C-alpha cells in the first residue's frame, strides 16, 4: 500500500510540474506574440521556445540555488534581478544568433520583466505551499 501511495504521489508531483511548465510556456508564448516577436516559420518559433525555455530554466535554477546559498537576506530581490538579467541576455543573444526570428529591444525588455515576475510569482506560491505543509 505504501508503494502505491508513493507512486501516486510521484505521479501527482510530476503532473503538477508539467502543468506549471505548460502554464509558463503558454504565458511566455502569448507575451512574445503580443510584444512583436516575429518568426519565419512555426518550426523556428518552436525551436526558439524549446531551446530558450530549457536554457533559461537551467540558468534560472542555477541562479536561484546560488542566491539561496550566498545571500543572507533579500532572496526574492536578488532572484528577481537575476532572472531579469538572464532573460534579457538570452533573448538578445537568441535574436542575434537566429536569423529567422526578431523582436524589438523594448519588447525583449518587457518580456524579460514579465518572465521575472512570473518566476517570482511561482516562487511565492511554492513558499506558501511549503509553509502550509510544514505547519
Image (cartoon, helix red, strand yellow):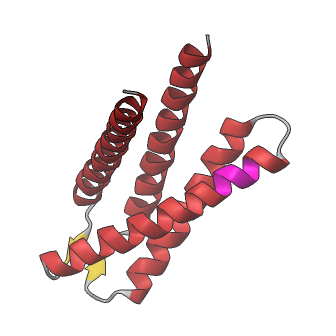
Closer-to-camera residue (30/62): 62
Farthest front residue in view: 1
Residue 37 screen position, x and y as percent: 26, 67
The answer to whether residue 112 is above or below residue 132 is below
Q: Tell me which residue sits at (27%, 77%) in the image.
A: 47
Q: Main secondary structure of the magenta part?
A: helix
Q: Which residues are magenta?
A: 63-67
User: Which part of the image, by quadrant, shows the N terminus?
Assistant: top left
Q: Tell me which residue sits at (61%, 45%) in the image.
A: 80
Residue 65 on the magenta segment: yes
Residue 106 in view: yes
The answer to whether residue 99 is above or below residue 108 is below
Residue 9 screen position, x and y as percent: 38, 33
Q: Is residue 107 left or right of residue 55?
A: left
Q: Tell me which residue sits at (64%, 59%) in the image.
A: 62
Farthest left residue in view: 41
Amino acid at each position: 500500500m505504501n508503494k502505491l501511495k508513493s507512486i501516486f504521489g510521484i505521479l501527482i508531483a510530476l503532473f503538477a510540474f508539467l502543468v506549471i511548465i505548460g502554464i509558463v510556456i503558454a504565458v511566455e508564448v502569448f507575451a512574445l506574440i503580443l510584444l512583436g516577436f516575429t518568426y519565419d516559420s512555426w518550426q523556428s518559433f518552436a525551436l526558439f521556445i524549446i531551446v530558450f525555455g530549457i536554457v533559461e530554466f537551467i540558468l534560472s535554477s542555477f541562479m536561484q540555488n546560488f542566491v539561496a546559498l550566498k545571500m543572507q537576506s533579500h532572496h526574492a530581490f536578488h532572484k528577481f534581478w537575476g532572472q531579469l538579467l538572464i532573460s534579457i541576455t538570452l533573448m538578445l543573444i537568441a535574436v542575434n544568433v537566429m536569423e529567422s526570428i526578431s523582436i524589438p529591444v523594448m519588447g525583449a525588455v518587457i518580456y524579460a520583466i514579465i518572465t521575472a515576475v512570473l518566476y517570482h510569482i511561482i516562487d511565492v506560491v511554492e513558499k506558501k505551499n511549503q509553509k502550509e505543509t510544514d505547519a
